[in-house]
Amino acid sequence: MSTALHVTDAADPRLADYTALTDVALRRRKEPAEGLFMAEGEKVIRRALQAGYPMRSMLLTPRWADAMRDVIDASAAPVYLVDPETAERVTGYHVHRGALAAMGRTPLPAAADLLASARRLAVLEAVNDHTNVGAVFRGAAALGLDGVLLSPDCADPLYRRSVKVSMGAVFSLPYARLDHWPHSLRDVTDAGFRLLALTPDAHARDIAEVAAETRTERVALMLGAEGDGLTPRALAAADTRVRIPMSHGIDSLNVAAAAAVAFYAVTHTS
Ligand SMILES: C[S@@+](CC[C@H](N)C(=O)[O-])C[C@H]1O[C@@H](n2cnc3c(N)ncnc32)[C@H](O)[C@@H]1O
């Protein structure tokens, strides 16, 4: 059981994990290297704990101390109580949900383990926007995919924004990094997955048609970043290029929207 400690000085070194959270470049560099990530808000903190992530400390505004009483009582991690103004000075932004927790990372599963057990996977190439990564995870979890494989340059699913947008799906859906891009895509096809490349290219096949063909197969759906989309090397590694037909002169969907349509097609086509 931990004791809640009142802290009034925003420069208190015990709050160092929470400083400068708006500095995206710093967090990108610092979080994975130090094995930390931020969980924001009561629900997200509870989901992270349920998923087995160890809590290093918690920063609460006083009105959240009661709501989080059971968490405080069950944890040995220090809990710092700060008023909302101090919280804002420490983090650099308004802490809307009044509760932040510095959580320790746990080792990711190996891609080989995910490939051995999954039937439906998403593969993301260079999706470097944290909001999009979070939204893809939310859709993948909601629509029944078994996991996500990330190219080495994809944004961090445990970055604060990704966690928030995913509604905690980054904790429940297993994911792994593919170490060698695009060579590791061979591991996906060697594991028996049909690798579908999602592209708005008019020459690609309609996703509905291909989804009907792949009902009994293991399928991996590969998506690219805003801007350029999938690289030629990733497209070349795929078994089949598939597209979601577009209307009204719109050339493409946002990657998370395209992902949700494709996930639905391969999980709900009978
Ligand atoms: C904004 S799009 C990138 C657009 C880029 N100009 C291209 O040609 O791929 C981001 C990702 O969403 C997916 N996507 C978007 N619209 C799609 C569509 N109509 N059909 C299939 N995939 C689509 C693709 O995986 C794409 O790499």
Image: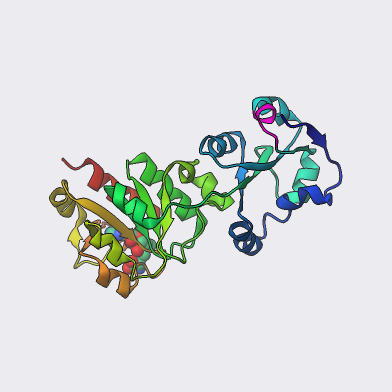
Q: Is residue 40 magenta?
A: no
- What x and y, as percent, mark residue 156? 52, 57
Give the left or right position of residue 174, taking residue 25 as reference.
left
- What x and y, as percent, mark residue 188? 28, 60
Q: Residue furthest bottom?
A: 232
Comparing 251 with 14, the one in front is 14
Q: Is residue 124 above or below residue 86?
A: below
Q: Is residue 69 above or below residue 18?
A: above
Q: How many marks?
A: 0
Identify the residue at image location x=21%, y=54%.
Answer: 207
Give the left or right position of residue 105, taking residue 270 as reference.
right
Can residue 199 be seen here? The reply is no
In the picture, the quarter occupied by the C terminus is top left
Figure colour scheme? rainbow
Identify the residue at image location x=45%, y=65%.
Answer: 152
Identify the residue at image location x=66%, y=63%.
Answer: 26
Give the left or right position of residue 215, taking residue 147 as reference.
left
In the picture, the quarter occupied by the N terminus is top right
Q: Is residue 250 above or below residue 146?
A: below
Q: Main structural element of the magenta stretch: helix, strand or loop?
A: helix
Quadrant containing ligand 1: bottom left
Q: Which residues are magenta?
A: 71-76
Q: Residue furthest right?
A: 9
- What x and y, as percent, mark residue 110? 41, 55
Comparing 93 with 108, the one in front is 108
- What x and y, as percent, mark residue 70? 65, 25
